[in-house]
Amino acid sequence: MEDEMFEQLMNFLNQLVAWIAAGAMVFGGVVPYIPQYRDIRRTQNAEGFSTYVCLVLLVANILRLLFRFGRYFETPLMWQSIIMIATMLTMLNLCTNVRVATELQTKRRSFTATDSKDEEIPNKLFLDFDWSNFWLWSRFVDYLQCVVAFTLLASYVTYLLLDSFVFVETLGFLAVFTEAMLGTPQLYCNYQNKSTEGMSIKMVLMWTSGDTFKTGYFLLTEAPVQFWTCGLLQVGVDFAILFQVYYYSRYPQKPVSHTVSHTTSAKAL
């Protein structure tokens, strides 16, 4: 009788741990963005955050959802992608509004200083198909249009080639490899600015702990090999960014212009 109760208790504990791990996988990816989101709202400054990180995560998670049609993986990973897509769109909306408001204020101050007549800032639209303005558009709806267009195109290609083993495996690799490159825009942004000012260090620490947990989860659940190999790469990029935090704080660099600051970051668990 005692052995049976002990076995039931162990089964319950195993299920509880599995539920907690699955919940961490689903919702843990958005946690690093909470301090970054609050910082941007509080300071009305998005210079330390790279919107290209949003691009990377959107592409990665859309491809991952399409990969599931060709090769099944756990449901928590599917929900993680859906929630991450919604989170990245939220971050994009905030960053776009803040950036446009900042540009407008700067323009108005410039016009006031030169006693010039106030003018409107020219809109950069997705439907203009100007590659020099790619992912630098003036409205959130343009980002939505781009995401919808990419999703429809990728879905159509996947539908045509779903029976191809090579295509499905390549799709899975592209999905997780793109996500593994998530930190590289922030890494490059920090390098260009010679500083990590404006970047949430809490966010990067959460990336590192989350990616470490995620990689272990992939290994324990025997996820497709693309998942855990790229997870290891993500952890490496996270540590590189943490090294930048240490290096630029210990050895401050010469201040540089923030003209490239709109290419400024966060990520997925």
Image: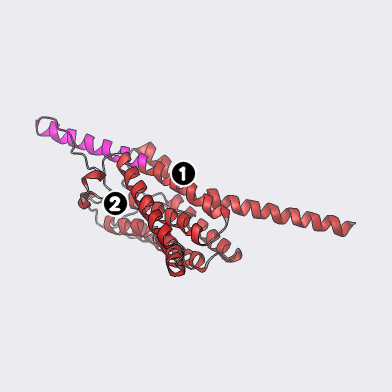
Q: Position of residue 19 (x, y in %)?
A: 64, 51
Disc 2 to disc 1, how far (Cα)?
A: 20 Å
Q: Earlier in the sequence, mark 2 or mark 1?
A: 1
Name the residue carrying label 1: 34
Q: Position of residue 134 (x, y in %)?
A: 25, 50
Q: Amino acid at mark 2?
A: Thr
Q: What residue appears at the point 50 percent right and 64 percent down from the top-left corner? A: 227
Question: As displayed, is residue 119 above or below residue 21?
Answer: above
Q: Nearer the viewer, residue 255 or 96?
A: 96
Mark 1, Cα crowd under 10 Å, few <14 / some 14-19 / many 20+, is: some
Indicate the colouring scheme.
secondary structure
Q: Nearer the viewer, residue 150 or 94?
A: 150
For the magenta stretch, what is the residue range?
A: 93-120
Q: Position of residue 60 (x, y in %)?
A: 42, 56
Kindly report the secondary structure that dominates the magenta region of the rendered protein: helix
Mark 1 residue element:
helix
176 left or right of 195?
right
Q: Amino acid at mark 1?
A: Ile
Give the number of marks: 2
Question: As displayed, is residue 151 above or below residue 43?
Answer: below
Q: Quadrant of residue 240?
A: bottom left
Q: Which mark is drawn over residue 263?
A: 2
Q: Is residue 240 visible?
A: yes
123 left or right of 205?
left
